[in-house]
């Protein structure tokens, strides 16, 4: 096939470290207006001033030419091909200089599919003791909580940002507010009044501000627990709050100002301040709150509507006609597209409750018991956990495995397993990656979806 040569005004030459590259403004436009190349062109991607180039013929860039060749090929084809002589860390540094790191990330992974996940690597942590929580960052990095410290890794996982240190307060939960900031909840130390919730910058580790709880016009000390965020509407942060007097419930803060904007107080006989999981349901404009065994002897799951200050859906196993094993719900997650809440017990049996029926019974899935590996060991510190991907796939951890469920009946279609590190105490999905944190060793595994083959 013969391709017509681009017009002369569309052609651009670069001298990168002594090597000449010739491309087109059309190719460079793929990098985006905010890239290194954007300021060289006007709104129509015509060169603003060719006199800026060397002798009016080429632009000189004092950078690595081998990496520039990879970047240029990525902009031309959308494929990322890294020659063996180029260290990936060097390429990422150069891609960051040209402002195309997002393009590299997108090309490195294929569309997320739990059945296509492949083990990539294991990362040993730098903190003593076991990790307690892991959270995937929107850009493919992650944060790992160990005791009173949160370690933050860049998306390359080759270096660690300055850790977030909470001065000996135990971390309860971590959540990414946006790609640059994390909210961290912690226990209050007895008599110190220094627990609660803070917003940290991921790059510097600096505390931006603390979130306060005000009751009767007084600032109260509190222990913050499970966290959730809502970008729509109004950019809110939610936290389970356990105070010393009446401030038990769910606090709500503005992400940008740090100001408390609401509080949902705990009703008698219900448990909100000890919640294990919060989840914002955008379609229903409600917050799911789940307090589960063994934190409490009984399990409570509810949907809160902050507009009306009402508990619009609720379920509890108090007085429910269940067996002892089935009532021990370990985790729960809402599946809005299915109008259901999925729960898991200590056998990794999945159960489903209909969101359209308030307080309905759990419909346990009998097939899961036939294909799972039996109950959790009595001395096992890690409980099954659930995660839901946007594509409708459900994930459940059990011992050292993560099961993937798909389809309208949530049939198990694959399992992810690595033997090193012991049981999985937490896992998280984000940035087209899955991260699994092990309990017995200070290590987490990284699972990625390979890009489709180049034809």
Image (spheres, rainbow, N blue to C red):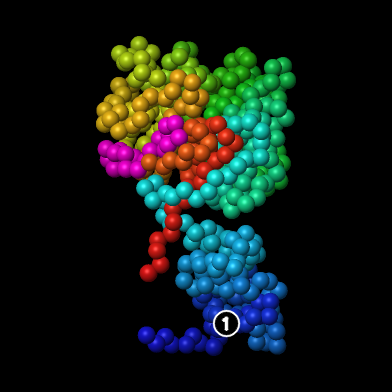
Instruction: Compare residues 154 and 210 and report the one nearer the observer.
Output: 154
The relative height of residue 296 versus residue 57 in the rendered view (above or below) is above
Q: Position of residue 370 (x, y in %)?
A: 28, 30
Residue shown at 48% from the left, 45% from the top? 434
The quadrant in which the C terminus is found is bottom left
Q: Is residue 425 magenta?
A: no
Quadrant including the N terminus: bottom left
Q: Picture coordinates of residue 286 (x, y %)?
A: 44, 32
In the rendered image, which quarter is residue 62 located in?
bottom right
Vertical comparison of 220 with 91: above or below: above
Q: Count the marks.
A: 1
**At 61% across and 63% down in the image, what residue appears?**
87
As drawn, 341 above or below 242:
below
Residue at left offset 70%, top offset 44% = 162
Q: Can residue 264 be seen by looking at this rendering?
A: no
Residue 327: name its quadrant: top left
Helix, strand or loop for the magenta stretch, by majority: strand
Across and down, in percent, residue 444 comes to 55, 41
Q: Nearer the viewer, residue 15 or 178?
A: 15
SS for callout 1: strand
Please say if 318 is above or below 420: above
Can residue 215 be seen in this snapshot? Answer: yes
Position of 243 with respect to 451 (left or right) is: right
Foreground of the two, 260 or 242: 242
Crowding near the residue tagged with mark 1, few <14, some 14–19, many ≥20 C-alpha atoms within 10 Å: few
Q: Nearer the viewer, residue 99 or 365?
A: 365
Most distant residue in the front direction: 419
Task: Please name the residue that numbered disc 1 is placed on.
Answer: 22
Percent x, y of residue 246: 59, 15
**The magenta stretch spans which residues?**
396-414
Q: Residue at x 51, y 39 (%)?
A: 420
Q: Is residue 404 magenta?
A: yes
């Amino acid at each position: 096939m013969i391709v017509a040569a681009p017009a002369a005004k569309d052609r651009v030459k670069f001298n990168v470290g002594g090597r000449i590259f010739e491309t087109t403004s059309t190719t460079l436009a793929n990098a985006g207006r905010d890239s290194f190349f954007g300021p060289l062109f006007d709104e129509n991607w015509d060169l603003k001033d060719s006199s800026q180039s060397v002798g009016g013929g080429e632009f000189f860039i004092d950078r690595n030419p081998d990496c520039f060749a990879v970047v240029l090929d990525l902009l031309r084809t959308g494929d990322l091909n890294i020659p063996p002589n180029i260290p990936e860390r060097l390429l990422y540094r150069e891609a960051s200089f040209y402002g195309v790191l997002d393009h590299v990330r997108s090309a490195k992974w294929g569309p997320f599919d739990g059945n296509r996940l492949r083990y990539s690597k294991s990362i040993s942590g730098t903190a003593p003791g076991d990790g307690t929580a892991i959270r995937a960052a929107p850009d493919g990095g992650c944060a790992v909580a160990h005791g009173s410290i949160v370690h933050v890794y860049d998306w390359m996982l080759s270096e660690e940002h300055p850790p977030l240190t909470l001065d000996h307060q135990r971390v309860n939960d971590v959540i990414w507010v946006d790609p640059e900031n994390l909210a961290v909840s912690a226990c209050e130390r007895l008599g110190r009044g220094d627990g609660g919730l803070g917003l940290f910058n991921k790059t510097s580790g600096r505390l931006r501000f603390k979130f306060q709880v005000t009751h009767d016009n007084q600032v109260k000390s509190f222990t913050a627990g499970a966290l959730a965020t809502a970008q729509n509407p109004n950019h809110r942060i939610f936290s389970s709050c356990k105070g010393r007097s009446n401030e038990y419930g769910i606090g709500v803060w503005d992400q940008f100002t740090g100001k408390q904007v609401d509080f949902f107080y705990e009703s008698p006989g219900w448990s909100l301040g000890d919640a294990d999981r919060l989840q914002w349901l955008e379609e229903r404009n409600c917050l799911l709150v789940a307090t589960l065994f063994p934190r409490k002897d009984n399990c409570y799951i509810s949907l809160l509507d902050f507009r009306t200050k009402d508990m619009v859906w609720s379920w509890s196993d108090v007085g429910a006609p269940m067996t002892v094993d089935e009532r021990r719900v370990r985790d729960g997650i809402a599946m809005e597209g299915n109008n259901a809440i999925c729960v898991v017990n200590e056998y990794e049996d999945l159960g489903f409750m209909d969101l359209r029926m308030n307080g309905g019974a759990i419909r346990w899935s009998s097939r899961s018991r036939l294909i799972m590996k039996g109950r959790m060991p009595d001395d096992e510190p890690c409980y099954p956990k659930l995660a839901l991907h946007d594509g409708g796939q459900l994930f459940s951890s059990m011992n050292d495995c993560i099961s993937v469920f798909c389809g309208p009946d949530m049939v198990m279609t694959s399992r992810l397993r690595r033997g090193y590190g012991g049981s999985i105490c937490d896992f998280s999905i984000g940035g087209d990656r899955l991260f699994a944190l092990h309990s017995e060793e200070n290590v987490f595994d990284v699972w990625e979806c390979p890009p489709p083959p180049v034809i």
